[in-house]
Image (cartoon, rainbow, N blue to C red):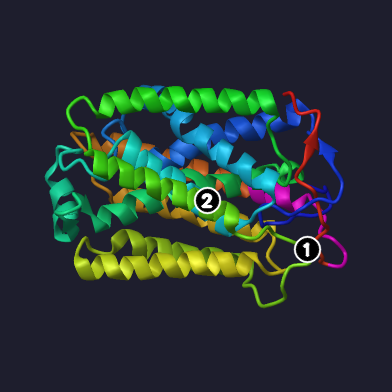
Amino acid sequence: MDSARPTGSPGTARTTRAPLTPLRRRLGPVVGLLLLSPICAEYLIGYLEVMGRPVDLLIGLLLLAPLYGTAAVLIREALRRTGRGWPSTLLLSAAFGVIQAGLVDQSLFNPDFVDEPSWDLERLPTAIPALGISADHILDFVVGHVIWSFAAPIAVVESCAPRAAERPWLGRVGIGVMVVLYGLAVLVFLHEHTKHFMASPGQLGAAAASAVALAAAAFLVPRCRAPRRSGWVPAPWLAGSTAVVLMTVHHVLPSSRPGTVSDLLVLVLLGGLVARWSARAQWGRAHALAVGGAALVTNAGLAFMVEPLGEVSYTAKYAANAVLMAGVLALLFWARRRLAGTVAPQDGAERRVDTGVRGEAA
């Protein structure tokens, strides 16, 4: 990204090819995304029974980073190299979400995935017996991956490194390493989750076809071109506040047919607003940080009301929740300071950039 342009819409096309930035400037964001993705995906909402055990949380992070973090990095690389924006981000994240929930851990189809009464209380009201799935779980799991596993971490980490936000972070070797790590993680988690349950061929085929369709749609969406459309965009604080409200409603709506329909409408509204605003010229990286940060704050806040699985000391649980909330606020404050250190373009216009890179062996 041009150091003088704090943009916020992924994938703006460059007119001149630029080499990768030095490895020392790329390594931090890559590691940050590798770690933030699984933290947002599994830890922030505070439902795991290991919430009160710091050592287990750290070990789990090392196991989850190759599954969630590598996917987030690969999604980001694909988007930056093809010059696409937030609609493509959401679609490609949805493809990986379907892969995770439908093919890897198969939580979409496994009626006994969690041995807790709450699992059936959430699943059965919207169950579709003929398909062996629950409409409520589709929204919770796939959308959860879209927002908290991938899109929000990408937005936040890019805001922490604004001068490299529009550029690819990996060369051929780095991408190869991410692909290998992701593949190994998929094999490990697939083996673990299919010891006692395996989805039917029809279910697996439908999940695979859905993932392919979502990924194809992500690359059929037109690339971001400058100048972008004119139109009103809310201030970052208002965009973030709107996202907090809609994401909170998503979490608290009941697991019933009316609740699921309402949830779908809320999520469509949220995705539509982000897609609409991000296509306009006044949308900046501060807006992306506000919306992505809203996702982190929402889950970290609601975690104090979530009952974790298994037996967990409430003292340890609330301590872990408080540490994670403090970490989220500190990260967002630092990201905002980093953005404030960049200078906005004088005319407010986006410059065309080319996502192609040279000398990308690393």
Callout 1, which amino acid?
Answer: Ala
Give the side of residue 330 with respect to residue 130, left or right.
Answer: right
* Mark drawn on residue 226: 1
- Which stretch is magenta? 334-347
Relative to 341, is 70 above or below?
A: above
Q: Which residue is mark 2?
A: 216
Cα distance in 3D space between marks 2 and 1: 23 Å
**In-front residue for pair 335/135:** 135
Q: How many marks?
A: 2
Residue 112 visible in rendering: yes
Give the side of residue 350 with respect to residue 71, left or right.
Answer: right
Tell me what residue is drawn at x 26 percent, y 57 percent: 136
Does the segment drawn in magenta span residue 250?
A: no
Give the side of residue 47 with respect to residue 171, left or right.
Answer: left
Relative to 312, is 160 above or below?
A: below
Residue 293 visible in rendering: no
Identify the secondary structure beneath mark 2.
Answer: helix
**In-front residue for pair 277/102:** 102
Does the segment drawn in magenta span residue 346?
A: yes
Numbered disc in front, either 2 or 1: 2
Relative to 184, is 289 above or below?
A: below
